[in-house]
Amino acid sequence: MAGVQLPVRPGTKLVLGAVLFCLFLSGAAGLVYEVVWSRYLALFLGHASYAVVAVLMAFMGGLAAGNWWIGRLADRVKRPLAVYGWLELAIGLYAIAFPTYYELCYGLYVSMVRSWTPGPAAGFVLKFCFSLAAILFPTVLMGGTLPMITRLVTKTLGEMQGRVAALYSVNSAGAVLGVVLADFWWIQAMGLSATVLAAASMNLAVGCIGLFLSGWMREGVEVGSVQTRAVEQAADPENGGASEEVYRPGDRFLAVFAIGLSGFVAMLYQVAWTRVLSLALGSSTHAFSIMLITFIAGIAVGAWVVTRARFARRPFRAFGFAELALAVTLGVSMFFYAYLPYWFVKLAGLLSRTEAAYPVYVLCQALICFGVMFIPTLCLGMTLPLVSRVAASAVSEAGSAVGRVFAVNTLGTVLGTCLTGFLFLPKLGLARTFALGVGLNAWIGLAVLTRTNGLRIRISTVPMLVAVAGIVWAAGPLFDRTWQGALTLGMWRPGITPPSRSEFLEVARTSNIRFYRDGAGATVSVHGDRVDGTNLFLKVNGKTDASTFTDMMTQVLSAQVPLALHPDARDVLVVGLGSGVTAGSVLARSSVRSLDVVEISPEVIEGAKMFSNYNRDVFHDKRLRMIIDDAKSFLLSTDKRYDVIISEPSNPWMAGVANVFSREFYANCRAHLAPGGLMVQWMQLYEFSDAAFDIFLATFTSEFPSVSLWRTDTADLVLVGTVEPRKHDVDKVAAALAEPEVKADLERLGLSNPVLFLGREVVSSEFGALIPAVGTRQHSDFYPVLEYVAQRDFFLRRTARRFQQLDENFSRRAETLLGQYLARHKLTKEDRTAFTRFYLAEERRFVDIMDSFLLRWLQDEPDALEPHEIATRFKRLEASAEHDALRYASLGQRMYDRAKTNPTLLRHYGLSLMRTYMEQRSVFYAPPTDHLSQVLQTLIDVDPDNQRLYQAYLAELAWDRGDDQSCINYGRLALLSDLPRGANKFKLDASAPLLLVTRMADSYRRLGQLKEAADVCDRAVQMGYFNERTRYDALLFEVTQRRVIAELAAATQGNK
């Protein structure tokens, strides 16, 4: 900078431009903090509605205090820009220290709640106090920034309105950017801590700019007209004619009171809009962020309009019209809210479900939000700048006037949030809550306008209250039935969309709604099906979370699987009540002494009472204790240990739910498990990719390294995890199913038979933890990767399937409980009857295993006709490969004779036999291999070009029958030439070499030759058999390699 001479003082435009830029960045940082700090505080306060309100009260209360206190100081300071710079620096420095300070607050809170055990009221006060302690200091400073800058740039009452509007608009625009940065980029890319530091850097930069400008313009050094030139406004035609009149104290009092009431109504709308739009669009984190962006963007534009509109020259009158316009636009828009799900699905239905289309999908959500919220929020954005002008009696109190107006407005927003969530929504419902806001806005507008037109007509309070009450009452019969039916359809889930709006409304109005509640945290409804109403569906924010139809298998097995594995369990915890079926199944066990169920929504508890015929009337069982709280918050507050913890939350793409899939949550669960206890986690496979499944499983196994996977239905899994490997006595497990009430509970699923029940285990605890690759990202409270991946998977409608490659029901050497059971017990007539009844009961179930089971039946009873009759009831009688094998077999000896000169026919016959074998083998059935082995041996002689493939097949047969040494010998022959000549192509079956290496490695491992097992796995990588192209279908190889490496490391460590 040597030789560069700065002007004595910066120009007016430069100062104003720099100030606006600083406010823009400050607004962005402020919303980043709000998003991130809310997440931080929710980690120990929870996501229960009262905890969320406590955080909001602390945040908004701090802003109000800063508006009021620092606003009063602003009019007395001589260097407002310097003070502003120090405020921003202090905010940034606090943010840098926040993660450390948070840990202190977290530890203190946990120690207090565990030693004190407060009740609901005391718990709310405690959470509010800790929220206040965590964020009061920076929010007070944030609240003081706008009044301080207002004092800097305002020199006359006439320009005050325009300046405040410009500052407020720019600050709000920055807030929009803050939400975008935090939720759509920084949190998912950097995690919470780095996001806080990024926002802190913005504050520090702004603070430095403010201090530099203050020194450059010699702020506070001179007084009077000389200093004023640095910030005075150039000729501005819009503000030049602004009103200079000073309003009477009564006008100012009404204006300030009205802006507080307006803030109250604004948050009423925001809470109600959030609920309506979450029902219409889905409750994902991105959807909530889009709603917030729309709300703030409308306010920013509304404030900007004040700087340009001629009607704003009479601010008090303009304020009244803005409130009336808000009431009218909101009232009219209410007639269209029922159509929102239909319009959104139609709009989103134009998109292909691809990665590239996801941003457009988010844009579709934004368009719906803007259509609903933009004009009303634009009206809201005009109110604060207008009232700020009315509230100031002199330019010398510009800072305190702005601070007072913003403080009262902010306090109104706090009150609006509390009353809307805890009182209006539960007691009035959505439609009447909106109507209350419309009535209050109309009241404000009329009260203001009657004072500005010279009429001095006094608006009587009682008639106005009666009118507002009338509006609220009328909204119920006018909207409730249609809204409840339309908004709870959950049309954002894949399904059938009514072809027209009229048909959509007809479906909505004829919905079989048995129960409906708008709660503080969610809208909960219970629906009967449209056929005969016998099946019930419990929906939370429009998403089905429990039912008596397809979900019964998951709900019952989530309880019966762990309690069969741990029949001596006494104390059980269930996270998420749902329909109460899981809780009822837990209490079917007479050995269970106590059951704690943590449910975040009181409305779900009410709705679950509709399921009394299915949940065994669980609420009348004295062993049940219902706890209304967030699961994470509850676990922090108790020292109780459980034998079994069952977690059944909603899907992780829903806002707030991913926190109970985090590493920290599982660590907390682990700390609350009794020795030998089981951790049970439900996980959906639908709307969930293989990558997301790996993240989830890597997270779960980080705390529970021994985990088995149980398939409850075609699209759901139950994971059973333990801290230490636990060997189960399969006979005791089978005996645990015989308890009368347990058997009756399972009988309604058709799963009371031990063979069927044990067959639900698809991956044993030997393999479960090995599925995700080493280094797979884990989902953490501080780095919530799963939450964002799951949102994309929901849009893309992906399904996690890769783990199915490990399904041990199709293995001859299954290490599952079923494999152990069949090694000790023969199949009985009862087993066959139960198996047949179960697989014939529902077409959605897999039939591959049934094919193999029927072959086992025929093997045991060759003359039985019943297996053939049962087979006719399946759509697929036999595997396609078996048809080919039978066709070639009809050629008889001619095929063998031909093979001496042309092995084509025999080659295809052998390949068909091998494919048939692999399709038919299972834990139940070992297909005969004598003939297949003979054909493969013959092909080795007559088809030398492919002899390595046939040797690989013989190795597979040897592994299946437990002959590990023969498997290794055949494998060596098949891979003999690989190292000197390069990898054999295995052109007839590209998957064969990797499967061969997998079997060889496992055989070496079983023989205790771990070094050789590791070497053969390394060879597969060197030869290119395992690469990016083959990775997806190579899960069995990956798992075997990881198992070998783990056992080799353990053996090496043991030798030391």
Image: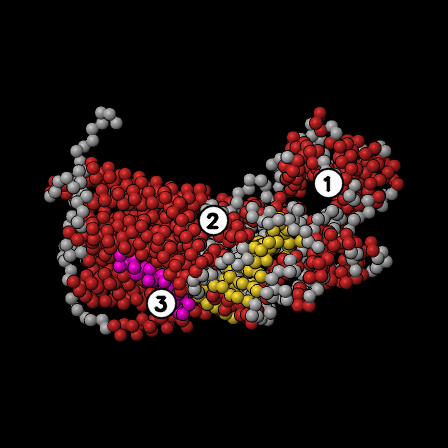
Q: Cβ–Cβ below 8 Å for labels 3 and 1?
A: no
Q: Is residue 646 left or right of residue 2?
A: right
Residue at which label 3 appears: 435
Q: Which residues are the magenta region?
A: 407-432
Q: Quadrant of residue 997?
A: top right
Q: In which image quadrant can residue 110 be found?
A: bottom left
Work out whether residue 177 can be spotted: no
Q: Amino acid at mark 1?
A: Arg
**Is 306 placed left or right of 646 in the picture?**
left
**Would you place residue 806 above or below residue 413 in this image?**
above
Q: Which residue is mark 2?
A: 781
Quarter holding residue 903:
top right
CA distance separating discs 3 and 1: 72 Å
| Residue type of the residue flagged with mark 3 | Ala
Disc sitting over residue 1006 in the figure: 1
Quarter of the rendering occupied by the N terminus: top left
As measured in the structure, the alpha-carbon distance from the residue carrying label 2 to the one carrying label 1 is 40 Å
